[in-house]
Image (spheres, grey):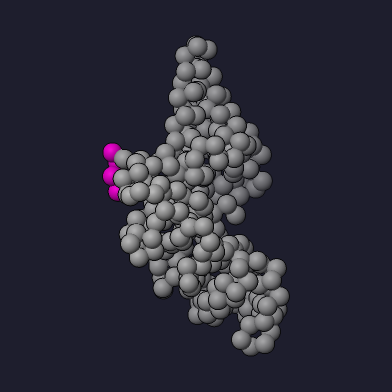
Amino acid sequence: MSGKDLLQNIKKLREMTGVGFKDCKSALDESNGDIEKSIEYLRKKGIAKASKKMSRTASEGLALVKELDGNISIIEINSETDFVAKNNDFINFCKELSEINFLSKGNLENLNNSKMKNGILVKDNLVNLIAKIGEKIIIRRAQFFDNNQGTNFFYVHSAIEKNIGKIISIVKIDGVSKNKDNDLGSKIAMHIAASNPLAIDKNGIDKKIVDKELEIINEEIINSGKPKEIAEKISKGKISKFLDDNSLLNQIWIMDPKKKVSDVLKENSSGKKINILDFVKYKVGEGV
């Protein structure tokens, strides 16, 4: 790695973790320049915490949602820069894709092989748009929520236009009415956008994610030099908090820190139990 590349990576790592220059350089040296491994290294050393900044990516683009008759579709299209994400040709392309995605029920293969208004297939129009704009553009992911077994609600954070933004969440809830409980459904969708749960409850969190977090917690505690019996108690407490913080029902309700999401569902149930059946959150570029 050249000196220039190293300095750029140090700067990036500092922005993501808030850690000093020397520690970032050491982490990169230990991790052969790999940013993600460097973050993990710093966390294990107890130097860096899992800050919100770690989820930042350089990827740009748009997320779009469409609702009709209680069915909702969502799609994310990525570009390299935010400049392109504001380009009218790109925006119009994304809008038409959102319509096609709804008809394709979130199936990207069917979407790519669908014809657009100009009579050309989506996948061929994509190539033409890339050639015109001069940036890599990816139709990254899509989903469809039907109106069976529950009611769908969505939330668009800081919409740039109606149903278009950088963060969109959808939630399917059983035991609520679209007209009567619109406010509750929309607030839960808003909570999901803000709190980024990994699953509905603790048991739904991917075991690989839990095991990795536990590994990091244990190594951090070991490196702190605490006795084994104390370390085990701390470890159990931290992993329990991690599970609560990342499971939707156990998260602190964003509109009242004295309540959990599960408490809000109980308070609003009248005769029939309210259950969250499914949800998704798209943050443009997240995980790329």
Residue 87 versus residue 206: which sits nearer the camera?
Answer: 206
Q: Give how far across and how far down residue 184 sits, in percent.
A: 34, 56
Region rendered in magenta: 254-258
Residue 215 visible in the picture: yes
172 lies left or right of 114: left
51 lies left or right of 132: left
Number of dots carrying numbers: 0
Residue at (47, 29) in percent of width and height: 240
Residue 6 versus residue 133: which sits nearer the camera?
Answer: 133
Residue 29 versus residue 120: which sits nearer the camera?
Answer: 120
Main SS category, magenta section: loop
Residue at (52, 12) in percent of width and height: 228
183 lies left or right of 17: left
- Queried whether the magenta region covers residue 255, the answer comes back as yes
Q: Give how far across and how far down residue 59 sits, in percent.
A: 55, 60
In the figure, 8 relative to 123: above or below?
above
Pick the quarter of the image with the C terminus. bottom right
Displayed quadrant of residue 51? top left
Q: Farthest residue toward the front?
A: 271
In the figure, 118 relative to 267: above or below?
below
Q: Give how far across and how far down residue 202 sits, in percent.
A: 51, 37
Residue 224 visible in the picture: no
Residue at (50, 53) in percent of width and height: 279
Q: Give how far across and how far down residue 32 sits, in percent.
A: 66, 39
Residue at (46, 50) in percent of width and height: 276
In the figure, 30 relative to 159: above or below?
above
